[in-house]
Image: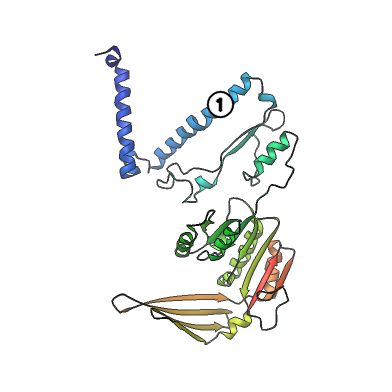
């Protein structure tokens, strides 16, 4: 036996290394429970060690080298990353993009510049990585010769993602939100083949919350009619204005009160060889709500039919109220046109289009 093998510390370290490797493999195979990483205390210790050894230690090496070279007084040091990391949070997620948790969305950013940035200061403004190149050039006393900001769009209440995918194909950076997990699943499948697919987020309209502002917000196919409570519509407008960059536009459409009233008591039917849809509508003057009751029949391989039922409710919002709510939210310019035209709407128009900024 060599002298190293006689050393208890070496032997103990070797045993611990083998046990750790075995536990790591077992964890990958059978889940986080084996290491206790699904326990909040263990996860917190892991996170602390991760930040110390990977973040602070690596950053300290860079700062120490700058001091050795006597460059620390003239160097702007920026500590950040392109995204947060799940690192086993939320019950054991290690990936960085499929789950939009706080750990993934909250990206660290710290600046150090002796004599220029006050130590210990905090800034509550929302900052994007797109701001960093401009900040670096500004610190160096220069600037980009051309405009460098991107074009980002939010598809509010995107449904199954048809509009979001069309916008992504046009080259826009698309965020798309919807309150239905089922529709978002279909939307993600629809966008799977795109080079730059939209980022889909599960959010109800009145609870809109983004990581950074966008250049424009669109909401199509009478999505805002589905907000039947006044406070929800006001809060949605307020949040849209909050997440728009200065000068950004909010474009949306709604079914008009005229159309929704006209649908009262109507019945529609559409059928193919393998499906049948029966659609009944009722309008309440008291609540200003149109209710759609939809029966869907699908032919099964054994010749029997499956029946499912859906109920949709749309609120008839008046032009006066929409303008009032938009103004309260902060929109100073509101342009109203008819359906698929740049002309003012007719008295019996079915759909209104709004352009707000």
The residue most toward the top is: 3
**For the point 51% across and 48% down, which residue is it?**
102
**For the point 30% across and 15% down, which residue is it?**
4
Give residue 346's quadrant in the image. bottom right
**For the point 69% across and 28% down, which residue is it?**
114
Is 289 or 339 nearer to us in this picture? 339
Q: Is residue 285 visible?
A: no
Left or right: 134 with respect to 101? right
Give the SS element for disc 1: helix
Q: Is residue 52 above or below residue 320?
A: above
Residue ID for mark 1: 60
**For the point 64% across and 39% down, which residue is it?**
122
Q: Position of residue 163 (x, y in %)?
A: 56, 65
Is 86 or 98 nearer to us in this picture? 98
Q: Position of residue 26 (x, y in %)?
A: 30, 39
Is 228 or 194 nearer to us in this picture? 194
Q: Is residue 11 above or below residue 185?
A: above
Give residue 36's quadrant in the image. top left
**Tag 1: Cα neighbours inside 10 Å, few (<14), some, or many (≥20)?**
few
């Amino acid at each position: 036996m060599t002298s190293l093998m006689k050393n208890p510390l070496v032997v103990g370290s070797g045993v611990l290394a083998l046990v750790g490797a075995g536990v790591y493999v077992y964890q990958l195979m059978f889940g986080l429970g084996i290491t206790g990483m699904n326990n909040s205390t263990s996860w917190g210790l892991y996170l602390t060690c991760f930040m110390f050894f990977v973040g602070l230690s690596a950053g300290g090496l860079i700062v120490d080298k700058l001091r050795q070279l006597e460059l620390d007084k003239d160097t702007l040091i920026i500590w950040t990353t392109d995204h947060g990391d799940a690192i086993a949070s939320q019950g054991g997620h290690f990936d960085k993009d499929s789950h939009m948790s706080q750990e993934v969305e909250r990206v660290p950013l710290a600046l150090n510049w002796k004599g220029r940035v006050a130590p210990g200061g905090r800034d509550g403004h929302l900052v994007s990585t797109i701001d960093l190149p401009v900040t670096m050039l500004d610190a160096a006393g220069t600037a980009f010769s051309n405009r460098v900001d991107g074009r980002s769009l939010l598809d509010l209440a995107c449904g199954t993602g048809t509009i979001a995918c069309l916008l992504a194909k046009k080259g826009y950076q698309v965020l798309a939100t919807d309150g239905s997990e089922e529709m978002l699943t279909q939307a993600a499948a629809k966008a799977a083949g795109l080079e730059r697919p939209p980022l889909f987020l599960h959010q109800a309209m009145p609870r809109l919350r983004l990581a950074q502002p966008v250049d424009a917000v669109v909401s199509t196919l009478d999505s805002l009619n589905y907000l039947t409570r006044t406070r929800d519509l006001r809060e949605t407008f307020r949040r849209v204005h909050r997440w728009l960059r200065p000068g950004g536009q909010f474009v949306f459409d709604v079914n008009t009160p005229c159309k929704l009233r006209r649908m009262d008591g109507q019945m529609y039917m559409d059928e193919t060889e393998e499906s049948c849809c029966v659609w009944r509508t009722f309008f309440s003057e008291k609540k200003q709500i149109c209710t759609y009751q939809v029966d869907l029949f699908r032919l099964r391989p054994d010749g029997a039919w499956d029946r499912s039922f859906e109920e949709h409710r749309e609120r008839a919002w008046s032009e006066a109220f929409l303008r009032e709510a938009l103004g309260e939210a902060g929109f100073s310019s509101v342009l109203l046109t008819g359906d698929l035209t740049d002309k003012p709407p007719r008295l019996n128009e079915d759909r209104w289009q709004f352009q707000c900024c």
